[in-house]
Amino acid sequence: MSLANNKDTSPLKSKDFGENFVWGVSTAAYQIEGSHNKNGKSASIWDIFSSKKGNIYQDQNGTIACDFYKKYKEDILLMKSMNITNFRFSISWTRVLPNGVGEVNKEGIAFYNNVIDFCLECNITPWVTIYHWDLPQILEDKGGWANREILEWFSEFATVCATNFGDRVKNWMVLNEPMVFTGAGYFLGVHAPGKKGLKHFLPAVHHAVLCQAKGGRILRKLVPNANIGTTFSCSQITPRSSKKKDIIAAKKADAMLNRLFLEPSLGMGYPTEDVSVLEKIEKYFKPEDKEDSVFEFDFIGVQNYTREIVKHSHFVPYLKAKIVKATKRKVKITQMDWEVYPPSISKMLTKFDAYSGVKNIIVTENGAAFNDVMVNGEINDEDRTAYLHDYIKEVKKAKEQGVNVNGYFVWTFTDNFEWAEGYFPRFGLVHVDFSTQKRTMKKSGHWYAKLIEL
Ligand code: BGC
């Protein structure tokens, strides 16, 4: 195992993080559940987007995925055998509200009740994300996140989640990575629903900011003793050179990738001073929106995988900033072509912790995809084990330096459907043979189980 990036060579021990530090694994409904049209579930934007040729690696989809819908007991038992005491999963909107709003699907509610109850039976605490990207297609047909009516639709969905599961679920995350679902889904068009351009992106951003806070308020009202958070993707941004142009480009990228959704929730508004195009959001702004964007979250979910090197580019509209691909930088990369750079996570934790409104931080995702090879039924994924080790060590460093970080969740439990990349990147602690659905714990899974053993 390479410890090259770490000066601290003492062995990593979970007890050094303190008794109240939570250790877990993270997942998302569309990436694991399958049973895409069973028991009343309707189509989400991911069902539709992945059914269209050319959108996903080898035209794959989440129709079956890891078959978690049928295998949830087996998977939760496997978690238990791995000493995992916290399980983050999301609620599929189209399973519980097939029409997006209106009639609640009892079978959908029953499924999540079963998952929650079985977790509790196994002494595993459920951490629920309300929205992890699978908007009902029926709502997308009306404009989806770009339509202000999403505020009402989302409120209804959040209310259904809170009232049905809030008696047993106390840890909640309102949205998963709004920058990714608005940026990739409504600006670049590489994720569902495949929309492109500012006219979709800017209203989607603004409505996601409002829903983020609205969801928080709904949970606060309906769930006694709730621990309410929301999650943000983030990457350390480093300018390619010390040239002024590159430094400005890096600042803009940082505002977009790391600040855009957090700052409005803290009452700071959008980072328009660094990214002037965000001023155009004004068009979608109602007088009450600044105040309605604010919510005092109990925790912020930090999701970090890599860092980005950014340079000035005249050809990139609005931002004039461009990411220098890790594949061109002769650095160690994962199957996602992301640089392995453990200090990025401590930098981001320190950055988020510096906001006075951020009360508590949980790393709600961190992990890596590598080309796992099975030899004699075993997967000796040293790369992933080293990655997790080195990143967790950076979390420890941040904590020792006073950052209020109190949890860590690996992305992810089993190999699963990795959005536009399909089943090619394998992120799991547990290998899945997608032709038989057989689970095989990888070396990293054994390692994590040992790390978090009480
Ligand atoms: C998302 C996950 C995704 C992971 C790895 C995050 O952006 O929340 O759904 O699978 O990163 O790409």
Image (cartoon, rainbow, N blue to C red):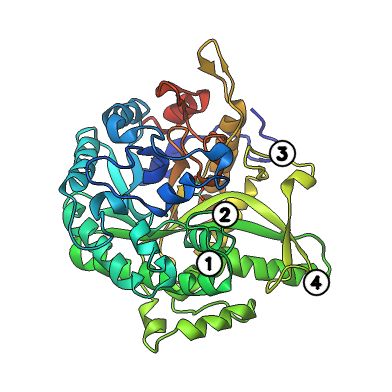
345 w.r.t. 86: above or below:
below
Residue shown at 70%/36% (left/top)? 4
Element carrying mark 3: loop
The quadrant holding residue 368 is top right
Amino acid type at image mark 2: Val
Give the mark, 1 or 4, whose residue is nearer the N terminus: 4
367 w.r.t. 382: above or below:
below
**Lateral position of residue 167 relative to residue 423, left or right:** left
Label 2 vs label 4, nearer the camera: 2
State the CA–CA distance, disc 1 to disc 4: 26 Å
Task: Locate residue 350, reporting x and y percent.
Answer: 56, 59
The quadrant holding residue 24 is top left
Residue shown at 19%/49% (left/top)? 168
Q: Which residue extends farthest bottom?
A: 287
Amino acid type at image mark 3: Lys
Label 1 vs label 3, nearer the camera: 3
Report crowding for label 3: few under 14, some 14 to 19, many 20 or more residues within 10 A (C-alpha). few
Amino acid type at image mark 4: Lys
Q: Which residue, given by chain and number where applicable, does mark 4 sit on?
A: 245
Q: Which residue, given by chain and number where applicable, does mark 1 sit on?
A: 354
Q: Which residue, given by chain and number where applicable, does mark 2 sit on?
A: 190
Element carrying mark 4: helix
Q: Which residue, given by chain and number where applicable, does mark 3 sit on?
A: 332
Task: Locate residue 1, reporting x and y percent.
Answer: 64, 27
Q: Quadrant of the C terminus?
A: top left
State the CA–CA distance, disc 4 to disc 3: 27 Å
Please say if the residues under marks 4 and 3 sit with CB atoms less than 8 Å apart: no
Task: Locate residue 343, reporting x and y percent.
Answer: 64, 49
State the CA–CA distance, disc 3 to disc 2: 25 Å
162 w.r.t. 34: above or below:
below
